[in-house]
Amino acid sequence: MTTVPVSLFKDHLMRKNTKSDLAHYLEKSITNVYTESKTGSGLLTVLDGGWLLYQVKWTAGIKYGDLADVYNGFIEKRYGRVIVVFDGYESSPKDQEHYRRVTKTAIDYAIDGQGVRVIAEDTGIFISLIHHWSPDMAEVYFQKEDRSSKTSSQSYKLSELHANLDPIVQKYILFIHVWSGCDTTSATFGQGKLQVLRHLVKSPEMHKNADVISSELSSVDEVSQAGIQIFVSMFGGKREENFTALRYRKYQSMITTCRKIEPERLPTTERAAHFHTLREHIQVIRWRTLNNDTLDANEWGWKIARGRNVPIMTDKEAAHPKILKFIRCSCKPNSTQCATNACTCRKTGLKCVASCSGCVGQQCCNTDVLNDVSDDEN
């Protein structure tokens, strides 16, 4: 029994995976890499403003106008024609607007026939560009940068990546990234990005459920059921196995084979899986449509608390209310404490029980009287 779904949350925050694992997998599909001097002339550079902020050293006391001039000089010297895209979080879950702006800017120009080089530090932007680029557009290069990088970076050509990437991975790349944990969704403990990718590639049934979660036409119930089936599959459940039954079976296996109970390794609860999947759905849809006005977050796994969006972990208590409200006293045995309101049990209208630390529900005057029934009584 835990107070939060620990397979999805840690310290009340969403669990995260290493996003670069998926990026490294994708990079293996690319045979050629390009330096800045070999990406070709005439490219428009789209810069991630979050990365750009770290590329110029600020001088103490510098005025805003002077600082802007320093940034302009840095950009003009290195990149020429540039569009800088900054974060715009507003009230939506973190980074959705950021990804949308960078991706949409680059793709819109590519559709119009303008070659583009995107310079960013976040794997999510790379994933989004892979999904949205198509061969009928102008070429798009992606140049991944680290904030502290001082060396010449390499760019990847999206047309080459598309030509070499597994078609199934290409089709479900957004779903893989979101289901395995991104900035606005939880990762599942013990299930990394590559584990999710490999499981999806070999599981036609998971393709169907991913299609449901990725469709704007799917209802809440359809999305929820698809997510639960994916959880069952990812945890090695049988095709028609009930999710709660699978969780209980995994728990039984753990207590009989493991020295230590680690609840984060168990499948989450069915209601936690429900809300988790709703968040997966809205994130995939918003990235697919590049429209943050698509769907209301508060109808898809989020709620407003203290003026900001927070994920709904579950809508069920950790256990039955009678267990959560379990009360016991610590009155001394054979004393008069259990006869007064000094006894916690009596004060709340309950009888003392065996778990009471002092009287153990026997050596006191606040316990049920049990009649001794002999074996030969009719």
Image: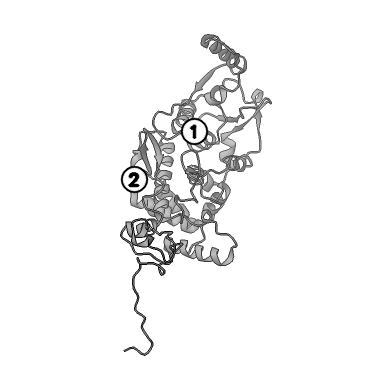
The residue tagged with tag 1: helix, strand or loop? loop
The percent position of residue 222, horizontal first and vertical second, equals 35, 52
- Cα distance in 3D space between marks 1 and 2: 27 Å
Image quadrant holding the C terminus, namely: bottom left
Which residue, given by chain and number where applicable, does mark 2 sit on? 217
- The image's colouring method is one colour
Q: Earlier in the sequence, mark 1 or mark 2?
A: 1
Check disc 1 and give the amino acid type. Asp
Dot 2 amino acid type: Leu
Residue 3 placed where, x, y %?
44, 51
The answer to whether the residues at label 1 and label 2 have Cβ atoms under 8 Å apart is no
- Residue 245 lies, in percent from the top left, at 43, 64
The residue located at (47%, 26%) in the rendering is: 87
Q: Nearer the viewer, residue 290 or 369?
A: 369
Which numbered disc covers residue 22? none
Task: Classify 10 Å Cα crowding around label 2: few (below 14), some (14-19), many (20 and above).
Answer: few
Dot 1 crowding, Cα within 10 Å, few <14, some 14–19, many 20+: few
Q: Toward the viewer: 320 or 255?
A: 320
Residue 239 visible within the image: no
Image x and y of residue 375, in percent = 38, 87
Residue shown at 35% from the left, 33% from the top:
293
Q: Which residue is mark 1?
A: 136
- Can you tell which of label 1 and label 2 is closer to the viewer? 2
Q: Secondary structure at mark 2?
A: loop
User: Does the image show residue 42?
Assistant: yes
> Residue visible at 38% across and 55% down?
225
Q: Nearer the viewer, residue 295 or 62?
A: 62
Numbered disc total: 2
Image position of 247 with respect to 49: above or below: below
Residue 320 higher or lower than 294, as above or below? below
